[in-house]
Image: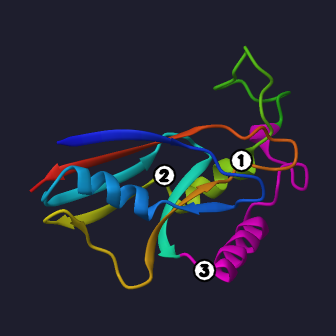
């Protein structure tokens, strides 16, 4: 198995980032490999999707997700209610109010698996590998996120 990690942080006003070229570069460094590629983000408020990277579609997706899981503060979430929540609390720092980000991640998932044939990732014409950080709002501090890339050779 081949494995690597890299860090990513979305810029100001950035809702997602196309990471296809970065993933292709990694696979290219591994040579003429074939197998199953796993792209995984190690955070419970981020997601990986394969879709078209078109600005209107990204805005439509963002609007849809906001309708499904409005930002914490616009809706009551038990996860954010520290008067009743007793699990998975970070006592060393102020707990974030981010149930909406967790829910969005649960909808699209933290990973994607892609076929690789002779060093080439198999993607459709408009398919791109997209990274989303749902834990961003005006008060959120932007953080480095870790993405792992591994290939199980076939």
Q: Are marks 1 and 3 in contact (CB under 8 Å)?
A: no
Q: Which mark is residue 14?
A: none
Q: Residue furthest right?
A: 74
**CA gap, disc 2 to disc 3?**
21 Å
Seen at 18% across and 50% down, the residue is 152
Which label's residue is closer to the chain start, 1 or 2? Answer: 2
Nearer to the camera, 63 or 29: 29
Mark 3 lies on a secondary structure that is: loop
Q: Quadrant of residue 8?
A: top right
Residue that label 2 marks:
110
**CA gap, disc 1 to disc 2?**
14 Å
Residue 133 shown in magenta:
no
Question: Residue 86 at x, y = what percent?
Answer: 71, 24
Mark 1 lies on a secondary structure that is: loop
Q: Which range of residues does the magenta coloring cover?
A: 53-80
- In the rendered structure, the answer to whether residue 41 lies left or right of residue 151 reads right
Closer to viewer: mark 1 or mark 3: 3
Callout 2: few (<14), some (14-19), or many (20+) C-alpha neighbours within 10 Å? Answer: many
Callout 1: few (<14), some (14-19), or many (20+) C-alpha neighbours within 10 Å? Answer: many
Which label's residue is closer to the chain start, 2 or 3? Answer: 3
Seen at 87% across and 54% down, the residue is 75
Residue that label 1 marks:
135
**CA gap, disc 1 to disc 3?**
21 Å
Q: Is residue 48 above or below residue 136?
A: below
Mark 2 lies on a secondary structure that is: loop
Which label's residue is closer to the chain start, 1 or 3? Answer: 3
Seen at 22% across and 67% down, the residue is 120
Residue that label 3 marks:
54
């Amino acid at each position: 198995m081949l494995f690597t990690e890299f860090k990513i942080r979305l810029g100001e006003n950035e809702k997602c980032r196309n990471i296809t070229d970065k993933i292709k570069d990694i696979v290219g460094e591994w040579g003429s490999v074939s197998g199953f590629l796993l792209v995984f983000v190690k955070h419970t408020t981020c997601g990986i999707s394969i879709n078209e990277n078109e600005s209107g579609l990204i805005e439509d997706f963002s609007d849809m997700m906001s309708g499904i899981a409005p930002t914490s503060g616009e809706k009551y979430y038990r996860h954010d209610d520290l008067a009743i929540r007793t699990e998975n609390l970070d006592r060393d720092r102020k707990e974030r109010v981010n149930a909406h980000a967790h829910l969005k991640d649960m909808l699209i998932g933290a990973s994607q698996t892609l076929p690789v044939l002779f060093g080439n990732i198999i993607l459709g014409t408009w398919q791109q590998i997209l990274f989303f950080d749902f834990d961003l709002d005006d008060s959120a501090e932007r953080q480095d996120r870790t993405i792992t890339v591994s290939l199980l050779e076939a």
